[in-house]
Amino acid sequence: QHSLSKFPYYSSNRTPTRREHKHFRPCQCVATRLNNQRIVLSNGNDSLDICRVVNGMWQTKGEWGNIDRDEAVDSMLKYADAGFTTFDMADIYGPAEDLYGMFINRVRRERSPQLLEKVRGLTKWVPQPVKMTSSFVRDSINVSRKRMDVDSLDMLQFHWWDYSNSGYLDALKHLTDLKEEG
């Protein structure tokens, strides 16, 4: 076991407020190597078993040409069959989450339950800095869940563009509430 890094749930060039400290504390992530291909990331009671090599899907945004969806999903299946079972995407990566949804359904239909248990989809939520209400956050996360065709997200990375806009604190509060709901 070794420590990956300390990283805060929030970061900015200002001192966190008492409200921020109350809801969001720095966390310590620990990685445990299972074998040459897999690692478990743990933080408190949370853990995530992932492949040590993550397949990035940013290029599916399409800025480098058209994406043949069937060919992309076939490639994802080849990666998974070879043991590369963790995929990184974002709501802003064009059809990345939709491709993952197509892929995970093919895995469910065409592959063993053992492979399905190893597949992970890591996504990012990159909202515009608008008012972060509970329903807005829930609806946004549900879009990703629907696109990826999963009941819950394996991991959600939150990206905020402008920390002078404190709406990210409300977003993090609502994300924490959703996580606690499962």
Image: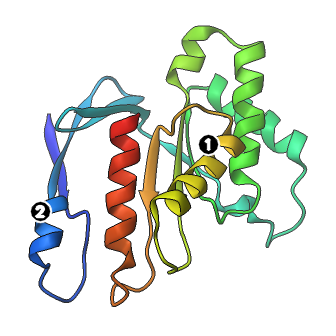
List the residue tagged with mark 1.
Answer: 145
- Closer to the camera in the image, 139 or 103: 139
First reached walking from the N terminus: tag 2 or tag 1: 2
Q: Is residue 173 left or right of residue 92?
A: left
Tell me what residue is drawn at x 78 percent, y 35 percent.
Answer: 102
Image depth: mark 2 or mark 1 in front: 2
Circle count: 2
Residue 42 horizontal/vertical position (percent): 23, 36
Q: Compared to 137, does 128 lie above or below?
A: below
Q: Nearer the viewer, residue 26 or 139?
A: 139
Position in image of residue 130 (x %, y %): 52, 79
Task: Assign the N terminus to one quadrant of the image.
Answer: top left
Residue 92: image quadrant is: bottom right
Type of residue at label 1? Arg
Identify the residue shown where x is 65% and y is 54%.
Answer: 57
From mark 2 to mark 1, how far is it between C-alphas? 29 Å
- Of 97 and 59, which appears nearest the observer? 97
Marker disc for residue 22:
2
Secondary element type, mark 2: helix
